[in-house]
Amino acid sequence: MAFDKAGQVASRQVQPTTTERDLTLPDQVFAVIGEKLEGMDKDFAESYRQLVDAYNSLLEALQDQVKISSFSELSFPAGQDISKYQVVWLADSHLLFPAFNTAVEEVSRIVGLSPVDAVIGDNLSPVHDGILFDETWEWTPQNHIYLGADGVLTETAPVAAPAYLVFIGEALTSNPIRVHIDYPITLP
């Protein structure tokens, strides 16, 4: 007995024409499970079909979550002049401002780094996750990068209040950084 991707019993076994490497991960999963289920009874085949449906629903739900949480598609106007790669936060007015590492309201509402210089009113799409490169950077490879004063990036972590420790990313080499903004940490 063989099964197709929808979990239906196939009337004949079809020999694959593509290599395993050419299959997507779900296709590989279905192929392996289908091979293991040959000779199983009809009730089990129905259970398998339900499992496949649940798996597909889960994949769709995860894809929807990823689309919703992606900041790269969101754009907001600058509430003041903002420099390229400044860390920005989103105010209640739906305007972007540079984030100060001493203001709890600002560090808790960081939406990313400005990818360009902007003047008041310019629309920006902050970078929240990803790789950024600037040929003028000279980071220490593998070092963490933090939010400094005035939304500026720094390799020096603040060590005491009133500042908050906000991990912005890490230097991959001297130039590119991997941006992955984390939650602020209250310092003693």
Image: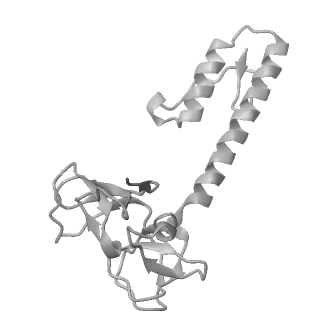
Camera-nearest residue between 33 and 74: 74
Q: Horizontal and vertical percent for residue 167? A: 36, 55
**Does residue 30 lie above or below 154 as drawn?**
above
Camera-nearest residue between 55 and 143: 143
Camera-nearest residue between 148 and 25: 148
Q: Horizontal and vertical percent for residue 115? A: 37, 74
Q: Say if residue 8 shows up in the picture.
A: no
Residue at the spot 39% in from the left edge and 75% down from the top edge: 114
Q: Is residue 91 left or right of residue 124?
A: right
Task: Name the residue at the bottom extreme.
Answer: 120
Q: Horizontal and vertical percent for residue 42? A: 84, 14
Residue at the spot 47% in from the left edge and 36% down from the top edge: 22
Q: Is residue 55 left or right of residue 66?
A: right
Q: Is residue 44 left or right of residue 68?
A: right
Residue at the spot 14% in from the left edge and 63% down from the top edge: 138
Q: Quadrant of residue 21?
A: top left
Q: Is residue 108 left or right of residue 44?
A: left
**Does residue 109 lie above or below 123 as drawn?**
above
Task: Name the residue at the right extreme.
Answer: 43
Residue at the spot 48% in from the left edge and 66% down from the top edge: 104
Camera-nearest residue between 123 and 155: 155
Q: Quadrant of residue 146?
A: bottom left
